[in-house]
Amino acid sequence: MKIRNKITLWITGTGVFVSLVFSLIIFLEMKELPYKSIDTGLGIIAQVLGRLTITGKIPSGVRLPGELPVDVNRYWIKIYDSHMKTIYRTELARHVALPVRKNMRAYTVTKLMPEKGTGLGEENKEVTFRVKTVYLRKQGSGYIIQIAKPIDQLQDEVTDLVQIIALGLLVTTLLLIFLSYGVAGRILKPIGVINRMARDISDRTLDRRIPIGKSRDELYELSSSLNRMFDRLQYSFDMQKQFIADASHELKSPITLLMLFMEGAVHRKDLPDSFKQRLIHQGNILRRMSRLVKNLLDLSALELKKNGEFQEVSLSGLVKSVLGDYEDVFAAKRITVAMEIPEELQVRGDKDELQRVLINLVDNAIKYNHTGGEIRITASKCDHGVHLSLFNTGIGIPKADLDKVFEQFYRVEKSRSLRYGGSGLGLTIVKRIIELHRGTLEMESEPGAWTRVNISLPVPAKSLQKK
Amino acid sequence: MKILIVDDEPDLLEELRETLKQQRYDVDTAADGEAALDKVFDNAYDLVILDIMLPKIDGLAVLKEIRDGDITTPVLMLTAKGSVEDKISGLDYGADDYLPKPFDMAELMARIRSLLRRTSERKDTILTVRDVSLDTKTRQVSKVGVPVELTPKEFSILEFLLYNKDRTVSRFTLAEHVWGDEFDPFTMSNFIDVHIKNLRRKIGDAEKKRIIRTIRGIGFIIEDAEG
């Protein structure tokens, strides 16, 4: 789950919980509030009745006009003596029985109304009563006054209250979700920026750093920590590249020495030819090593290179000159060469490096071709630059190896290096050069039949070119 | 011919001194820039072979001093870096040629001979073997005075073998020389024989008394003496 959703969930959850507790308190308070006024009213009537009872006016008269502020018959009233004997009851109390709950001063009871005689017009219906019980003690005897009132409308008010609270909760929850989602986005926005920056820093752009904000908050610390990590990474990357460059460089003198010694020995008159042939063979192994060192050095120079000095290069001219160098080779191997490149096609790049790319690719196209085979080089303008493709017949590359051939020292078969030579860095160098030109490179092949290398080089907009 | 070799690698210095002595050159050596400058200003050399990486004073500074001192002795720069920048700055400072390490003796020999001829009093630019002659300046080849048309690659092979007269040159060395550094000599050496065959046909190299002789399993040699 995304942090943003988590934060939203947490804030919403906490908010809803707090709102629920708040609503519950409000609900309980509000629920009791209407009863309080009723209870007070009932209490006043009960007090009056109690006084009347004690003075002996009840049960002599049922009607008590003038003494009470209300019509007694609208109430359910019962008065008991200390032996729980009813000494007075209203018409309503005659028809409906309500329980006496001791220890409870006020409570609600729901009763089914009888068919007639209540005078409420609520026959055969459930009616809720609010009941109040008052205990009186006077001159050794006690009375219990139980007084009740139907409270239908109050029930509705409680339902309304619940509905309002539920609606409020719903709106609050929705608001919380929206707001907390927005807040989470705001909190996470700088992290997103840092993340994008960190992602954009690749092994090629290790010199870039995350911009650090002004306030010294947690994000400032995160950015600085990441930047310090990039410092260390860049340092070890550079060290490694420098090491390869230095090591290759240091290898050159001893290789020269060995080469000179072996060559010198070949010219000595006192050594048998068979021994000289073995020396020549050793010399070739040494040359292979020298070649590898040279390629390693070239590659590390390309790795350390940020971007080159580019110029306009005529593609057809470059291809022609490289193919010219191989002319006799094509003739000897009876390879048919076709070239289809518009004369006016120009690319921007480093001429020497682009030539290197062509040489390495043509070299492969010859090496892995068969006698009487074919090489086709075509180029054309495409949407965002120049597309160059080099096709050759030959042994091809298995599908599984196609994207690995650009890795350093990768070989389709170990035996190929012995049969065909090469340092195993040729295509890695090609790839690096194309990358420096911000181009793309891919290879397709039909094993046993053909191989095709596709290169696209971007042609920068006129405005970006040097004036 | 007197040659000064400047390099800080004693073994390399010794190896070069021995080989060049065998070729009847008068060889002097220096192991650092200071010693090199002392020797250059005290002696008249026909050629200076100068490594770029040197203790005390580096090769480029030495070269600058030499040229500032109005000494026009040809200078061949050696460098292990092999970068284009080194080459350019070397040539800018007035070096006459440039050879990246690792190099082989045949290549060094060809460069030395080419430099010595280019600047020699005689302005002798003609290389010959028996009745075949090659003009390094006009790039003309003739057999018994009759011009022979060679392709650039064939010319390059013949010239290289002539510079290395009486020394066996391997296919690899030839491939590296003819096609240059960028090309893979392992691919190219397979095609040297084709060029040698064509070359032999064009200069009328008879079976019995080969001018370009194949040394089996080793390479090719050009000799004056008919063997």
Image (cartoon, coloured by chain):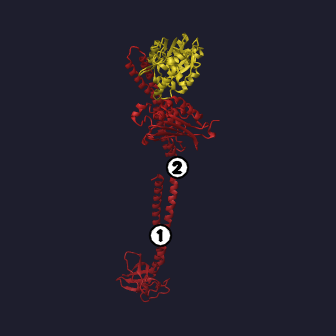
Chain colours: A red, B yellow
In terms of image quadrants, where is residue B40?
A: top right
Quadrant where the C terminus of chain A sits is top right
Taking A385 as reference, is A8 above or below it? below
Instruction: Pinpoint the chain carrying mark 1.
Output: A
Q: Position of residue B155 (x, y in %)?
A: 54, 22
Disc 1 element: helix
Instruction: Pinpoint the chain carrying mark 2.
Output: A
Asked if disc 1 and disc 2 are in contact, CB closer than 8 Å, the reply is: no
Q: Position of residue A375 (x, y in %)?
A: 51, 36
The residue that label 1 is drawn on is: A162
| Neighbours of disc 2 within 10 Å: few (<14), some (14-19), many (20+) | few
> Farthest residue in the left direction?
A83
Residue found 51% across the figure and 35% down from its top: A336
Which of the pair A113/A205 is nearer the observer?
A: A205
In terms of image quadrants, where is residue A55?
A: bottom left
Q: Earlier in the sequence, mark 1 or mark 2?
A: 1
Q: Position of residue A458 (x, y in %)?
A: 57, 40
Q: Position of residue B113 (x, y in %)?
A: 52, 16
Can see residue B56? no
Which of the pair B6/A28 is nearer the observer?
A: B6
Q: As shown in the figure, which amino acid type bears the numbered disc 2?
A: Lys
Taking A13 as reference, is B225 above or below it? above
The residue that label 2 is drawn on is: A189
Disc 2 element: helix
| Neighbours of disc 1 within 10 Å: few (<14), some (14-19), many (20+) | some
In the rendered structure, find residue A5 and report the number of the disc placed on it: none
Determine the CA span between mark 1 and mark 2. Answer: 40 Å
Q: In screen coordinates, is A138 left or right of A338?
A: left
Residue found 55% across the figure and 36% down from its top: A339
